[in-house]
Image (cartoon, grey):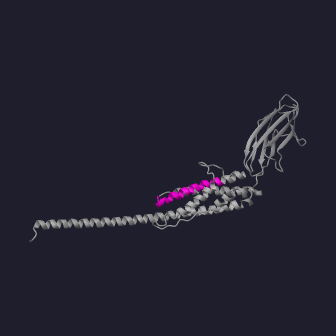
Amino acid sequence: MARTRAQRRRHSFFLTIALVVTLVVLVFARDIARSAHSAITNQRSENRSFAGLANTLITQENNFDLRTARLLQSGGTLSRPIFDARLDQLDQQLAYWSTSADLLRRPSLAHDMNDKIADMTDTRVGDYEEIFAKIAGALSLPTPLPVFNGTPTPDPARSLYDTALSWNKERFGLRHEPGTVRLDALTLSSAKLFMTNGVTILTSSPSLMVVRGIGIAAVSVVPAPLPAQHGVLLLPPVTKIKLGVSVVNAEFVEQRVTLEITMSPSNGPLPAQRQTFHIKLAPLQSYAFVPRDIAVVPSERAILDIRITGAQGTLNLSRSKRYRVELSPAGHA
């Protein structure tokens, strides 16, 4: 029996709807496929970019590890200033690691690989800083300063070793992700060496041994003394004299110094005068002390003692100076 016109219209309507739905599904599926492909492409790009930056950082850390191990092994052949400079150069490089590690935290990657390498690097920076501080402390070196942001690690060498082992297991996390990237392993040379020997090799080195030596480099007197025999300060008839004392630290070690100046008259109305100064001298540095004016009177006779304490004197410099002070009578120049 022939279909009515109404039935034919309904059939055409439903057929049109089916075609529209099919078209929408096909377009939606195509968009999903494109979006998935784009996501995979972006993830592949992110993973590969991360791997390039991460491996650059790991290469820097491994080169640093090698240099540190060499310094621990052969540093005993260096002089104290050169060893200190090498140690300070290594210490200053650590700040760049932290900056590089922070840049790797974004964008987030599968298995938290970016946070893992950043956290691992921050831990290793702290471990190296503590190791260098232990070395500097054992050798009484001025740098690097033992300053920590948190609680010091009881065994930084063990921590350095453990973080490297942990990373060497975690580094395969992106192997089966888009891009199939390969992350490099960390080396363990300096951690093993410090765990085994600590600072023993360095502290047993004669060239790195702490040697202390201070001395009085020069003494100035105002007004200028008149010509007289050695050890005598023959001065015009004044009421005060100004002193300047230059002290030198002749060795590569920070040194506390105490300067004592005593003026002891043997005649006249003035009592004995004494001044004391304390200072910490940097390695191979000098310091000029300027005491208060010393009161005197014409015709006075006195003994001026200048003495520094804190360490033994050097071969060419003395730790004490004694002068016989003689002032001319009033009316004489």
Judging depth in this view, the residue of 1 and 125 nearest the camera is 1
Residue that lies at the very extreme toward the right in this rendered image? 229
| Quadrant position of the N terminus in the picture | bottom left
Judging depth in this view, the residue of 290 and 67 nearest the camera is 67
Residue 37 percent across, percent down from the top left: 39, 66
Residue 243 percent across, percent down from the top left: 79, 39
The answer to whether one can see residue 311 in this image is yes
The answer to whether 201 appears left or right of 53 in the picture is right
Which residues make up the magenta segment?
A: 107-131
Relative to 265, say whether 201 is above or below. below
Q: Main secondary structure of the magenta part?
A: helix
Tell me what residue is drawn at x 82 percent, y 36 percent. Answer: 262
Residue 201 percent across, percent down from the top left: 72, 58
Quadrant assignment, res 33: bottom left
Judging depth in this view, the residue of 18 and 259 nearest the camera is 18
The answer to whether one can see residue 141 in this image is no
**How many callouts does the rendering have?**
0
Q: Is residue 270 magenta?
A: no
Residue 166 percent across, percent down from the top left: 56, 60
Quadrant assignment, res 222: top right
Judging depth in this view, the residue of 232 and 131 nearest the camera is 131
The answer to whether 176 appears left or right of 62 in the picture is left
| Quadrant position of the C terminus in the picture | top right
Tell me what residue is drawn at x 13 percent, y 68 percent. Answer: 8
The answer to whether 184 appears left or right of 198 in the picture is left
Residue that lies at the very extreme toward the left in this rendered image? 1
Residue that lies at the very extreme toward the top in this rendered image? 269
